Every structure is written in C-alpha cells, then in structure tokens.
C-alpha cells in the first residue's frame, strides 16, 4: 500500500459501443448494442443510452432486443477495437514502463515507475492530461482512477464513470470501502459472496469487522486472509508489465445445432486457421492443440494432443484438430466448437515431422505419430464476402464508403457516412449488387477525423 496515489487505472467507457458511435455519426447519442446477433448471441457492450433500458454485458441478445427494441444492434468489429486499443496502450506506455493491460479497454499504470508522478497533485494532473490525449487521438473517452493500490484505483475508475476522474487520498480508504458491497473486493465472486451473506456479511465494513479468524473459518486460510486484508484496504499487488498468454483459442456458437458431420469438420478446419492466424499475430507457436465441443444439451468436452515441438503451421493444427474430432460423437448436434493452442513458445520446431518420425539406433520412436500434412492446393481466387452483417464497413462504387444498417429478403440497407462526416443518407441495394463490396474501416482518430470533416470527399453523395 503506497503513501501516494501513484497507481492509475484506466477503463474505457462502454468501449465497443463508444467506438461504433465515434465511427458512425448517425448513432451518436443513441442506444447502441454490440454483440452476437443470432438467436443465441449475447451482448458484448451496450452504450450508456442503452443501459438506461436495463441492457448490460453478457445479457442474451433476445432479452436486449425486448428491452431496447429501437437500439442499433451491431456485429463486433474487433480489428477496429484492437487498433483503438493499441493507440490507447501506447499513450499509457509513454507514462511508464509498467503498464499492465487487463483487456483491450482496461489497464493499470505505475506512474512512479515512469517518474510521471510522485504526489497526489502530480498524479491528478497526469490523469487529466491522459484523458484529454485519449479523446484527441481516438475520439472515445475513458475514466481514470488514482490510488495507492490496484484495488482502490479500479474502484475509483468505476466510480468516475463515465468520462471522469477520481483520486482516493491515502488514509481515506476505510471511509470509502466500508459501505460498499462485499462483492466489490477482488476474489469475491458469487460463491464467496453466498458464503459471506449466509454469515451476515454483506458489506466490506462487515468483512473488516468480522476479523481474520472468522473469515479464515468461512473461506479457508489463504482466501480468508486475502479477503480480510482487502477489506482493510491493504493491497500490495504490484503492477506487472508483461502477462504471458498461456494459450490462444477461438470458438464459435452456432445459431442452429450442427448435425452434419462434414459441416462440423469444415467448421473445425476454419477455426484452426483462425487460431493459427491469431497465434502468428502474437508472434507465438505452440505444442498442444485443444478441441472444444459443446453439445445441444450444453455438455462440454475437450480433447487435446501434444506435438514433440512447437508449431505455427496451419496445416499441422488443422490436421491435429481433425484427428481429435474423429473421437467425438457429434450426431446429437453441436452447439459450440472451439480450437486452441497451448504450451506457447517464441519459436517453431523447424523439422517437426522429421523429428516425429525419426528412429534412434534402429528402433521406432515411442512418441506421437507424425501428423500427416495435406499437399497445398493451388490458390483459387477468393469469392467476395457477401454477408451483410449490421455494422460492417462497405463501399459502393457510386456512393462511396458506408456501413451496413440491415439486410434481409434479398436486400441490404447501407448508410453512407464516415467518422468525420455529418449523419449520412440511407440507400438500399440488392444483396448481389456488383457495385457494393466489403471494405476496410475508415480511420478513427482526432487528426484523421478533423482533416476529413471539412473535405468534400467526406460528405456522402446524395
């Protein structure tokens, strides 16, 4: 626990939805909900306008539609969110070498380690300047909490939302913490909360007054001691700059259960390719391939196999995932599929298959059999992606850039606008219109947006 509030916690405000509002002028100030749009989809993020209707993250999308039927329901654009996140994280790393990202939109910063702030006044000035830089660079906002520990800094940023800053002066922790629900403390989830509530402990102050001995009796030695320390405002966890990923994985939930075996195999191949792409984006390789299958009744099983050396070869991961699938019965229907790679490394095993099939002193190796690799097929011209999902970026030869507002019954509706333009006009086309195609997202950022907002090219054609 520090004597000065030099730990900063940044939490971007309704991040995915805020990015969509910044990119789409017609949605600013209106309810926006981002997430899976199928009947089994869930809400990833809801804008503050949608939250007034009771919509929140992890809510089933069907329930969100009933609560806020007039919202804009958009498919996530993770490439855009990652790009904005990279800009924000670069601003944080300019303050200190100790930046601990928790997700795309959240991070801790040790200001003292970067010599950015050593007093409450300096920390507050840094927090204000940071919020201004983020808004200028990305046109989205974030909330900042400052305190002498990670726990308190996170609580402060939550209390500062949206688009605010709160500093907790050392020495005032107990006054702030005591009335808060005990669920506020790190490590107190639903199960722990239930145990504490049955013992009459509902607030942080109750936990502090209960004493360490009672909490250890209820929760066990390690957990009880930790909860008691947090309830007293004691948190000595350091800001850790690097968090090594233990695995890389991708998964899809299907709107309708898959029963066709060929379709299941195709989806596993596709997921394996996506998994390797993400693996390579992180500059990693891995030794263990994991297949996840969730059935129609929500029962979930995983299968894994380990190679003799790390790989980032899509053919290897694809074939090993397919081999794992052979041992899984999918006739009753598959609700979700996932492919992951664990045992990550920073290099690949160049001669993996030769090594796997090698013999020593004339004896067969007892290791796993080599994974057969399919001969590469001649590259074919990829077909254009004609899935017109709401929110995705498109361009029209005559009308310029825009985004999909909706589609169905053979038609697709597009709103033609860019981040720096006024709200744009809406036009409808056939889904097979050859002049309409998917496109890269337009730049989202202060300088790009300001430079385009006054130009003729930024105004949609009528």
Image (cartoon, rainbow, N blue to C red):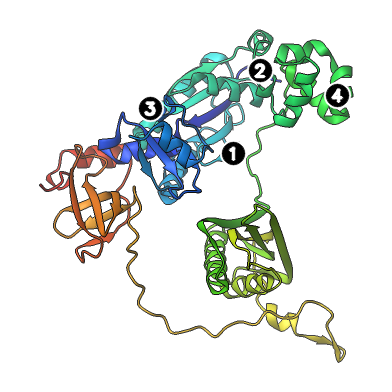
Circle 4 residue: 218
Circle 3 residue: 49
Circle 1 residue: 102
Q: Answer with mark 3 or mark 1, whichever residue precedes in sequence.
A: 3
The N terminus lies in which quarter of the figure?
top right
Q: Quadrant of residue 347?
A: bottom right
Q: Cα distance, mark 4 to mark 3?
A: 41 Å
Q: Cα distance, mark 2 to mark 3?
A: 26 Å
Residue 129, numbered label: none
Q: Secondary structure at mark 2?
A: loop
Mark 3 or mark 1, whichever is nearer to me: 3
Q: Answer with mark 2 or mark 4, whichever residue precedes in sequence.
A: 2
Find out whether the residues at labels 4 and 1 contact each other: C-beta distance under 8 Å.
no
Residue 284's place in the image compared with 266, above or below, is above
Q: Answer with mark 2 or mark 3, whichever residue precedes in sequence.
A: 3
Q: Cα distance, mark 1 to mark 2?
A: 23 Å
Q: Answer with mark 1 or mark 2, whichever residue precedes in sequence.
A: 1
Q: Is residue 90 visible?
A: no
């Amino acid at each position: 626990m520090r004597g000065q509030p030099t730990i900063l916690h940044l939490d971007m405000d309704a991040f995915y939805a805020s990015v969509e509002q910044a990119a789409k002028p017609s949605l600013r100030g209106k309810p926006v909900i981002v997430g899976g749009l199928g009947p089994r989809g869930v809400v990833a993020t809801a804008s503050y306008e949608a939250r007034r209707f009771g919509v929140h993250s992890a809510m089933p999308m069907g329930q969100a539609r009933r609560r806020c039927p007039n919202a804009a329901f958009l498919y996530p654009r993770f490439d855009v969110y990652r790009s904005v996140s990279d800009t924000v994280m670069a601003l944080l790393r300019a303050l200190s070498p100790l930046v601990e990202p928790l997700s795309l939109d959240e991070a801790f910063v040790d200001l003292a380690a970067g010599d950015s702030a050593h007093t409450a006044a300096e920390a507050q000035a840094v927090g204000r300047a940071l919020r201004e830089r983020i808004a200028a660079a990305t046109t989205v906002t974030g909330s900042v909490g400052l305190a002498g520990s990670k726990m308190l800094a996170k609580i402060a940023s939550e209390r500062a939302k949206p688009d605010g800053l709160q500093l907790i002066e050392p020495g005032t922790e107990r006054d702030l913490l005591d009335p808060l629900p005990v669920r506020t403390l790190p490590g107190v989830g639903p199960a722990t909360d239930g145990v504490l509530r049955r013992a009459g402990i509902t607030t942080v102050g109750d936990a502090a007054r209960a004493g360490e001995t009672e909490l250890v009796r209820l929760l066990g030695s390690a957990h009880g001691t930790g909860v008691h320390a947090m309830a007293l405002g004691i948190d000595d966890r350091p800001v850790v700059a690097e968090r090594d990923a233990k695995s890389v994985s991708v998964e899809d939930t299907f709107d309708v259960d898959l029963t066709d075996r060929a379709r299941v195999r195709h989806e596993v191949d596709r997921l394996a390719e996506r998994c390797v792409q993400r693996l390579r984006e992180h500059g990693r390789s891995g030794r263990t391939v994991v297949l996840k299958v969730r059935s129609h009744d929500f029962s979930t099983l995983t299968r894994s196999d380990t190679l003799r050396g790390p790989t980032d070869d899509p053919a290897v991961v694809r074939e090993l995932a397919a081999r794992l699938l052979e041992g899984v019965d999918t006739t009753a229907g598959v609700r979700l599929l996932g492919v992951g790679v664990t045992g990550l490394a920073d290099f690949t095993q160049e001669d993996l298959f030769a090594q796997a099939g090698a013999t020593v002193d004339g004896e067969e190796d007892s290791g796993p059999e080599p994974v057969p690799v399919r001969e590469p097929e001649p590259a074919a011209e990829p077909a254009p992606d004609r899935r017109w999902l709401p929110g995705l970026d498109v361009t029209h030869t005559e009308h310029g850039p825009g985004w999909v507002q909706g589609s169905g019954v053979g038609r697709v509706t597009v709103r033609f606008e860019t981040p720096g333009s006024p709200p744009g006009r809406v036009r409808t086309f056939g889904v097979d219109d050859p002049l309409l195609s998917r496109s890269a997202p337009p730049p989202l950022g202060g300088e790009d947006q300001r430079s385009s907002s006054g130009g003729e090219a930024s105004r949609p054609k009528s």
